[in-house]
Image (spheres, grey):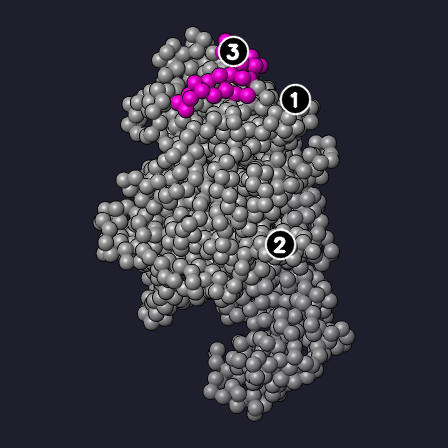
Amino acid sequence: MTVLSVSKLCKAYGGVQAVCEVSFSLASGELLALIGPNGAGKTTCFNLLNGQIAADSGSAEFEGASLIGRKPRQIWRMGVGRTFQITATFSSMSVRENVQTALLNFHGKLNSLVSLAAYQYRDEAMQLLTRVGIAAQADRPCAVLAYGDLKRVELAIALANRPRLLLMDEPTAGMAPTERVALMQLTAELARASGIAVLFTEHDMDVVFAHADRILVLNHGRLIAEGKPADVRANRKVQEVYLGSGAVYGGAHA
Amino acid sequence: MSAFQERQNEPDLSLSAIFVQLLNGLAAASSLFLVAAGLSLIFGVTRIVNFAHGSLYMLGTYTAYSLVQWFGGGIFGFWGAVLLAGLSVGLFGALVERLLLRRLYHAPELLQLLATFALVLVIRDFALWAWGPEDLLGPRAPGLEGAVAILGRRVPEYDLFLIVLGPVVLGLLWLLLTRTRWGTLVRAATEDREMAGALGVNQAWLFTSVFALGSFLAGLGGAIQIPREPAVLTMDLSILSDVFVVVVVGGMGSIPGAFLAAVIIGVLKAMCIGIGNVSAFGMEFSFSKLTLVVEFIVMAVVLVIRPWGLFGRAQGVPRGTASVEPPLSLPSPGMLKALAAALLALTLLPLVSDRYTLVLLTDILVFALFAVSLHFIMGPAGMHSFGHAAYFGLGAYAAALLFKYALPMELALLLAPLAAGLGALVFGWFCVRLSGVYLAMLTLAFAQIAWSVVYQWDAFTGGSNGLVGVWPAQWLSGKTAFYYLALVLCAGGALILWRILYSPFGYALRAGRDSPLRADAIGIDVRRQQWLGFALAGLFAGVAGAVYAFSKGSISPDTLSIPRSVDGLVMVLMGGIQTLTGAVAGAAVFTWLQDTVARQTEFWRALLGGIILFLVLVFPQGIAGFLRERWEARAGKRQS
Amino acid sequence: MTARRTFLLGTITLAIAAVFSGPAAAQNTIKIGEMNSYKNFPAFLEPYKKGWELALDEINKSGGLLGKKVEVISRDDSGTPGDAVRTAEELLSRENVSLLMGCFASHVGLAVSDFAKQRKTLFIAAEPLTDQIVWNKGNHYTFRLRPSTYMQVAMLVPEAAKLNKKRWAIVYPNYEYGQSATAGFKKLLAAKQPGVEFIAEQAPALGKIEAGAVVQALIDAKPDAIFSSLFGADLQKFVREGTQRGLFKDRPVFNLLAGEPEYLDPLKDETPAGWYVTGYPWEQINTPEHSKFLAAYRAKWNDYPRLGSIVGYSTMMSAAEAIKKAGSVDTEKMIAAMKGMQMDSPLGKFSYRALDHQSTMGAYVGRLALKDGKGVMVDWKYADGAGYLPSDAEVKAMRPAE
């Protein structure tokens, strides 16, 4: 089932086409990677979908409803979860409270002045933390967590609204190589188990080729290739773009 | 119509008059610019909100006065004195940075503000001790004593000199900032502190030199005023709000912005004065009276339209490097017992204490709720307010007015906070669109606008004299009865606000402060939460204000003045902004200190300032913050 | 750590001690509570304090009152009504003072006056000039020493009317004192000189006058004469700019209070000659009562008196006289004693009116002149306050019923 369909998305900054006529679609349970060299328009494309910036033209529909022109918080309400390149968590809360806060809002209880937040949706939060494998850290302040664990907290927070689409900006940035694999493994399992569609940008080609079901390649704001990892790897245009980096051949990190 | 009859009475505001008023405005703008440029530099690089900047200006004027006396007259005597006064103040500023502020860079945010506030108190008393209480009118500038005829009007030569001096200093600063390595570093640090650190900049040296330059400019700005105005002990605070306005309107850290803002405000004031009284449609309006508040109106308008001032850029909240706040965990049974015991003690106290203790405690309770409500938005919601007294004062005035004009005391007391909440709802709507110091300054602007309305509206609010005869109902007129009323309302209010912080709404507030990005991404409308939080805090400040009005029997505009707002800030910071009970500790200690210290010595302000400095240095995390650390350390020991 | 702990313990001990230690009530002294905004208005109030301290010395040297020594408990009221009311409460309930005296700013004075009414305590307001304190907000418990804004304006108006100038410009600090002075001047002058016009008004914020612009605006209005109630730093800036720009050339200026040494002395050689002012020409007053005061003041303080010294001295003496005349420190008896009480003061005799509790102490009205590089008053006369008050009927109509 198609969850996200993007068609002819455009965004220009002062004459420079950051994103130009990008079209693609994404099905539930599928992991789609968005790659490209620096300045290719990945982040712009991402921010067009999550509501950070407004598109000049084109459409992006989530489950048939347009995402264009909506604020991030509205897009979240539609059932889209997000993680950030640099983790953004609530540092004055414990790990569990971070997730509880998201859950409270998901259940429409965040405006209550009366109930004790710390006792709301504890079990549900613990379940999510268990799913991402950091239940043991539930009571620790977010501020003291290791970076890899923070990424998992973000994932748990992003899952709180039972999303059908997960937008992950550089999910493994700043992590050790072994941690990267583990995190993406986890993401893939969660996506397949719950039928969540995942769109992620990524620098690490090992991660991309190991976990993506499909890959989109952007260059100068345009989509230059799309397909299964093996097809993309063999694509000449992609090889040109990445020429010299060697990254696309998966040998750089070996 | 009457408008025609009065036309002949109106001042003739010809083009030439307008031109000369323009010159007056520019002359006034120059010295304002010098002082503001110093403040802007200091803030830009060190992110210190320097409350003592007006005191540096005052020191400049006094020092220049003394030096001129000492050197004797003459061109060299005068200008040498002016320059040397600026330099000595610059040196003093460097010492302050090295000996005091340097120790506080790692303290929680805004703590340096508390230290500079203490300096204001100390310097004011030092000036009184050193120069005496009388106003000191310095000599005119040798060589520039006369006046030049311009369009048939006499304009002092010194004013023309000032008009030139402003742009010259602007040019010199511009050269310094763009053509020297030091200037490049200053600009880098202004734009991105961390990057400057990464560039291998010797930050300690950079901060000291910037503080010295900023202080020099403040001192020089004061020194060049001696031909225009006397050295008086109140000039520190009277210029402080003006330069803050200039810096914020221009955009913090922007020197050209400060210049433009100084010119706008200087000229606008001169024009208001030039226009004078205008009657239209049978109504008389005095533009001259508008000078009381015109700069704050300008600031409010500019900030609403441009949230970072004219030339400023978006910037983060000024946070200290060590400001990661520990999680707000539910109070332990031990803490709850301690709280209950404290409440019980307060309840039983009237049995043993004398009448005055109850009066003092009533004040402390009132200010505790005021401080807790301020902490509510400053701490967990991350919105620094420099104008929280507006809501305290609105509550107080609403109580007094409802009581005087219509309602029984009990009803007035209960309804008054709604007026404060409504005020906070209106002002807050604009404020939450801003962040950091800009937000703080917009709250200040609104508070000053509210103050000026109350101050001017004689027929309704009693004007500068305020309202008297606001006494509680018979059954509450005893000090014990009123103390219990204050205890119920203020302690109750504080408990409600604290309890709210543990509710989902409180979590949403903290979420918006910790990471607006993440809060937005989990569907939280951060602005809306902040807005409601602001209004709630205003409501409870209004409760404190209403209780205050009836405890004093009278009410005057100073309940919503800047000093009252600053008192609130001092209480919150002194107690520890990262600790929930900090505001209460701060309010208690500050109010008690003021009461006690004022009786001890003639120079009680300096003593109070000294005590605050001591507290800041010894307990940078605040009094309650320190106690909590001790508590947690002990609890930890017991566990192990 | 130990330093911190010691500090905390010390503080807590002190706090507890402060809370529970009521002062031992001394039986052999009469206590008088005095409060003022010493830190806010030191130029006026330091001499004021010296004044009442001198008076206190004299009282105690001559045997005190009712056979007891007199003690003044003096407090800084921090300059806000709220703190002042708390200070007053402390003086009453902890120090057990018999009466209150002092205050400078009008809004503080009014707050304390209303507090005195609530607590049924005698309050002698020393300096607050506001007309309200004895008239529309007057009360049974409050007396006021200084000639009010209205009275001082009234003292200047006869001279102003004599000049018969048609077009007047007015400048005043933008708060109640300046507003009342302006309203009073307009009303009184218009009554004496029908057809007079008030063509321009400037109301700079207190302490923040943009003197150049204000002076220019007044010049542009082309007035025949100027009435000002500026004082302190505002006055000095106004004088300097006005002189430089030629505002005062051929224009008579009337300025309330400008002859008081507190405000006149800083002007030094820039004193604008010819201005009509109220003030205190201390060095020229040769009455026996003033000479005696002057000698005593100089002997004790090695300084010359300002008007504040007179106010402080006379307030203290009024309190003493009230107690002496009442023969008791009972509030009602003291109030009864003060109604119509005759006083000797350095400025001569005056009395506290039974009608509105205003003293009839006067002020010196004269013109400014420059002598030996400093400002002095010339052609002055003492204007007895009794002659510059509205009719009894008017006062009764204003004053709330008791």
- Image: B372 above or below B472: below
- Image: C318 above or below A250: above
Residue B90 on the magenta span: no
Instruction: Name the image quarter holding residue B208.
Output: bottom left
Task: Please name the residue shown 58% across and 29% down the image.
Answer: C390
Q: Subunit of mark 1?
A: C
Q: Which label was assigned to residue C193?
A: none
Q: Which residues are magenta?
A: C325-353
Residue type, numbered disc 3: Ala
Picture coordinates of residue C115 (x, y %)? 58, 26
User: Which element type, helix, strand or loop, lies under badge 2?
Assistant: helix
Task: Please name the residue shown 64% across and 49% down the image.
Answer: B424
User: Which element type, helix, strand or loop, lies under badge 1?
Assistant: loop
Residue placed under numbered mark 1 in the picture:
C402
Task: Please name the residue shown 52% across and 25% down the image.
Answer: C386
Picture coordinates of residue C13 (x, y %)? 45, 26
Q: Subunit of mark 3?
A: C
Residue type, numbered disc 1: Glu
**Pointer 3 local density, CA inside 10 Å: few below 14, some 14–19, many at least 20:** some
First in sequence: mark 1 or mark 3?
3
Picture coordinates of residue A216 (x, y %)? 62, 82
Residue B613 appears left or right of C358: left
Q: Subunit of mark 2?
A: B
Q: Which label was assigned to residue C326?
A: 3
- The alpha-carbon separation of the residues under discs 1 and 3 comes to 21 Å
Say which of marks 2 and 1 sits in front: 2
- The alpha-carbon separation of the residues under discs 2 and 1 comes to 43 Å
Residue type, numbered disc 2: Glu
Residue placed under numbered mark 2 in the picture:
B6
